[in-house]
Amino acid sequence: MKVVRFCLKEYLDSHNISRYELSKRAGIGYPVIDGYYKNKVYRLDGYNLGRIIEALNCQLTDILTVVEE
């Protein structure tokens, strides 16, 4: 079965951006960003995703990946 996974950790690490900085840029609480960073999200929130990719100036495919589980 294929599942969608966040690769936000890799993206932030490679761009030298902290979770705290992303939280401030996107206007999303740190615990929510931390959940995405640790891939502990069970439902994707389109509103938050939009704010994150806007804050990072990236594409959705830069922070999400599809993997075989």
Image (tube, rainbow, N blue to C red):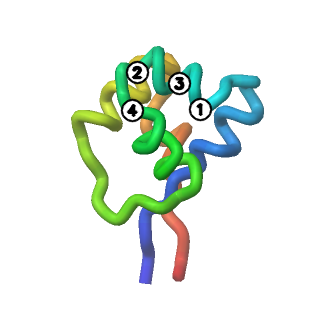
Residue 22 badge: 3
The quarter of the picture where the N terminus appears is bottom left
How far apart in space, not on screen, are marks 4 and 3 (Cα)?
Answer: 9 Å
- Label 4 sits on a secondary structure element that is loop
Q: Which residue is mark 1?
A: 19
Q: Amino acid at mark 4?
A: Gly
How far apart in space, not on screen, are marks 4 and 1 (Cα)?
Answer: 10 Å
How far apart in space, not on screen, are marks 2 and 1 (Cα)?
Answer: 10 Å
**How many labels were placed on the picture?**
4
How far apart in space, not on screen, are marks 2 and 3 (Cα)?
Answer: 6 Å
* Residue 57 against residue 37 in the figure, above or below: above
Residue 14: image location, x then y, percent: 76, 32
Task: Say whether marks 3 and 1 touch (CB < 8 Å).
Answer: yes
Task: Say whether marks 2 and 1 touch (CB < 8 Å).
Answer: no
Q: Which residue is mark 2?
A: 26
Residue 59: image location, x then y, percent: 46, 30
- Label 2 sits on a secondary structure element that is helix
Q: Amino acid at mark 3?
A: Leu
Q: Which residue is mark 4?
A: 29
Other residues around mark 3 within 10 Å, as few (<14) / some (14–19) / many (≥20): many
Front residue of 36/46: it is 36
- Label 1 sits on a secondary structure element that is helix
- Label 3 sits on a secondary structure element that is helix
The residue positioned 40% from the left and 19% from the top of the image is 54
How far apart in space, not on screen, are marks 2 and 4 (Cα)?
Answer: 9 Å
Q: Nearer the viewer, mark 2 or mark 4?
A: 4
Task: Say whether marks 2 and 3 touch (CB < 8 Å).
Answer: yes
Q: Amino acid at mark 1?
A: Arg
